[in-house]
Structure formats: structure tokens, C-alpha cells
Image (cartoon, rainbow, N blue to C red):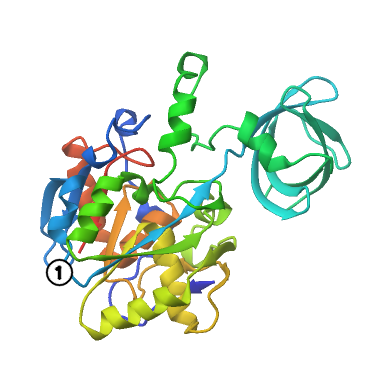
């Protein structure tokens, strides 16, 4: 589902319009020791003014009566290794449970896989059968019904880190660290295969300070999946179609949003996933429906209906995430902020620093 507004301004629809260069050393490979020590770039939409702060100072930009909306999805350790009957190694990312012991999976193999083939997960802990391959490259697989797959993932699975975060045998010691830090402190509902990274910067201490400040906190859920992280492959971004992702927006959150708007206060979305939940609900006027599936792809120009302020990380070029941020703050303004961030040594992507667009 692709949505635009009717604003009259230059419209950037080429994928190349959302490209930029980034030195490899600015890609954060691990999180900082303390979550709230990340740098925070403040971008003022109306003037283009930029400020450089630290994340624990975010309360200075929040007001009593504001509503801060966080995504409480929980990342599952969905990355596992496997083998074919021949002994050849496989790498699997379980992306979505579609039925009892049935999952969609992205499988990396050195040779072509075959429908009906049996594979083995972990150290031959459990077998699975390849049912069919979808157009998006994912496989539908079924596991032995005698096993609890989520229990097995908890025991042998690793956090599904993005491919630009490198882990090798010399960095095995970081895996337990990733299990804690590639997860928000408020994660509750299992189902994501990628962290809502803007939320990674919040510590319990920061959340308490925000509450004491008089800013209300609310939670929605979007299980980050293939829709969020799959690349745009069309030259015209308007032709890109997002995969559907499951979301929940409790009725009380909708009521809080309406109350916030009535009092002329701001709704602050933490991350693109929270933003997409809120805008999906607003677009469909879903007062009664509080859960469902969304494939909302936000690109310029777009009239944001609920979201007034956006907290977000620095995203990869040519992605739906960067396009959404450009829709919110303007392409030129965002890419200019990215250049400034690069020059000042900000850390980029999932484990990196973040920005607040007000």
C-alpha cells in the first residue's frame, strides 16, 4: 500500500535520489556501553536548524502533555545454522510463523535447494522439509511437530543482526551482548526479526525521567519483518510494494492520541515502525480495529496525520526507512543532516546514533 499527499513541490521518485556515500568506519559494529550515551542530532523541520546533543538530553525536547509512542515488539533469535543431507552448510533466517511448526525462511546455500528436500537445523537437533519457494526468495518450511521451535530458537538461535554488522569467530563473545542489546528494554511481544532500532537508546532511567517530566508514554506493536528491511528494487520508488507486517494499536492509544491532539500537544513516534502503525491507523480511521496487517509505504509527498515528531536512527541509502524520513522532513534537509552527521563522526545504522526531527 503506497500513499502520497497532494502537496505541490518537487517530487523525488527515483531511487537514486535517496542515495548517499558512507565511509565503512562510520557503520556501528556494536552498541555503546550505555544506551543513552548515543549522540542525538536535533533537526528542526521549519528552519533546517541542527543541534548536536546526547540522547539522555532528549527530555529537553519533550513537553508535558506530549505522547511518546514506542514499539514494544520483541526480537526472536531467528538466525540459525543448518545442513543438507550431503553435509553442506546452510544459514537460515526464520522470518514469520505461518502455522503450527510452519515458517517462512530466508536460506543461504552454496547450491540450489530443491522443493521437498529435508534439511537439519543446529547440530542435527531437528529436521525440516522445504515446501516451496516464494517469489520474494523465501522458503516455506515445516518442522517436526514433536518440537517447540521457539524453545529451540531460544537455545541455539542467534539474534538476526543486519549483514553490515560483522560477527566472526573472533567476536563470538559478543553474541550474549547482542542478545541483550539488540533488544529494547521495553520489548514484550515476540515476533520481530529486526529490532526497532530507535528504541534501543532508551534505558529504564531515561523512560522514568520522561514520565517524571510529564510526557506520557504509550506502546504499539509492529513485528518488524521483511517489509521493513528488504531493499527497494524498482528505479521508481512509487512502484515498490512493501511486505505486510503485523501490528497492534490498542484502543487506549488511539484515545490518547485524540486527547493529545485536542490539547494541541504533540505525538512523538519513536522509529519508523511506530510511525507506520500510527499512520496506518489514521489513514484507515481504524477506531474499532486495533490490530491487523499493514504494507504502508510512506514516501514523499505525504501528509502525516498523527505523527508530529519523529525519533529515528540514521538509515541505509536507498531504503524504505530513509524514504520515510525524507517524507517527514524533506529530502534536502535530511540528506544535508546526514552529511553533517558524517562530517562529525556520528555512528550510523542499527547500533548507531540517532536523530530527532521536530
**Other-residue count near label 1 (Cα within 10 Å), few / some / many at <14 / 14–19 / ≥20:** few
Residue that extends furthest to the top in the rendered view of this protein = 170
Check the image and report above or below for 193 versus 270. Answer: above
Residue that extends furthest to the right in the rendered view of this protein = 116
At x 77%, y 27%, the residue is 125
Q: Position of residue 74 (x, y in %)?
A: 51, 49
Is residue 190 in sight in this rendering? yes
Check the image and report above or below for 174 versus 127. Answer: above
Q: Position of residue 113 (x, y in %)?
A: 80, 35
Q: Position of residue 19 (x, y in %)?
A: 36, 49
Question: Which structural element holds mark 1?
Answer: loop
At x 46%, y 18%, the residue is 171
Q: Quadrant of the C terminus?
A: bottom left
Q: Position of residue 267 (x, y in %)?
A: 29, 71
Q: Quadrant of the N terminus?
A: bottom right
At x 79%, y 24%, the residue is 124
Q: Is residue 329 left or right of residue 113?
A: left
Quarter of the rendering containing residue 81: top right
Is residue 236 in sight in this rendering? no
Q: Is residue 232 left or right of residue 115?
A: left
Quarter of the rendering containing residue 120: top right
At x 36%, y 45%, the residue is 200
Check the image and report above or below for 159 versus 283. Answer: above
Q: Which residue is mark 1?
A: 46
Quarter of the rendering containing residue 91: top right
How many marks the image carries: the answer is 1
Amino acid at each position: 500500500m503506497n500513499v502520497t499527499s497532494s502537496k505541490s513541490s518537487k517530487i523525488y521518485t527515483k531511487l537514486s535520489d535517496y542515495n548517499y556515500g558512507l565511509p565503512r568506519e562510520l557503520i556501528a559494529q556494536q552498541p555503546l556501553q550505555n544506551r543513552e550515551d548515543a549522540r542525538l542530532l536535533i533537526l528542526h523541520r521549519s528552519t533546517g536548524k541542527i543541534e548536536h546533543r546526547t540522547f539522555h538530553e532528549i527530555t529537553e525536547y519533550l513537553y508535558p502533555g506530549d505522547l511518546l509512542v514506542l514499539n514494544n515488539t520483541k526480537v526472536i533469535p531467528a538466525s540459525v545454522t543448518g545442513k543438507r543431507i550431503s553435509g553442506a552448510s546452510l544459514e537460515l533466517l526464520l522470518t514469520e510463523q505461518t502455522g503450527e511448526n510452519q515458517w517462512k525462511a530466508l536460506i543461504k546455500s552454496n547450491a540450489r535447494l530443491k522443493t521437498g528436500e529435508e534439511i537439519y537445523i543446529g547440530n542435527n537437533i531437528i529436521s525440516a522439509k522445504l515446501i516451496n519457494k516464494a517469489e520474494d526468495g523465501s522458503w516455506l518450511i515445516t518442522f517436526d511437530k514433536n518440537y517447540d521451535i521457539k524453545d529451540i530458537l531460544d537455545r541455539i538461535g542467534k539474534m538476526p543482526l543486519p549483514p553490515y554488522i560483522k560477527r566472526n569467530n573472533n567476536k563470538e563473545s559478543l553474541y550474549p551482548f547482542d542478545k541483550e542489546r539488540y533488544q529494547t528494554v521495553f520489548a514484550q511481544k515476540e515476533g520481530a526479526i529486526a529490532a526497532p532500532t530507535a528504541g534501543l537508546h532508551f534505558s529504564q532511567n531515561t523512560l522514568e525521567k520522561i514520565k517524571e517530566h510529564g510526557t506520557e508514554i504509550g506502546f504499539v506493536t509492529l513485528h518488524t519483518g521483511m517489509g521493513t528491511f528488504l531493499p527497494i528494487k524498482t528505479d521508481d520508488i512509487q512502484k515498490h510494494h512493501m511486505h505486510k507486517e503485523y501490528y497492534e494499536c490498542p484502543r487506549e492509544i488511539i484515545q490518547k492520541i485524540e486527547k493529545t491532539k485536542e490539547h494541541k500537544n504533540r505525538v512523538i513516534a519513536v522509529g519508523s515502525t511506530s510511525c507506520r502503525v500510527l499512520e496506518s491507523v489514521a489513514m484507515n480511521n481504524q477506531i474499532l480495529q486495533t490490530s491487523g496487517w499493514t504494507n504502508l509505504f510512506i514516501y514523499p509527498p505525504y501528509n502525516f496525520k498523527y505523527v508530529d515528531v519523529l525519533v529515528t536512527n540514521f538509515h541505509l541509502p536507498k531504503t524504505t526507512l530513509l524514504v520515510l524520513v525524507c517524507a517527514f522532513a524533506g529530502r534536502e534537509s535530511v540528506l544535508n543532516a546526514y552529511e553533517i552527521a558524517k562530517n562529525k563522526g556520528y555512528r550510523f545504522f542499527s547500533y548507531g546514533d540517532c536523530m530527532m526531527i521536530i
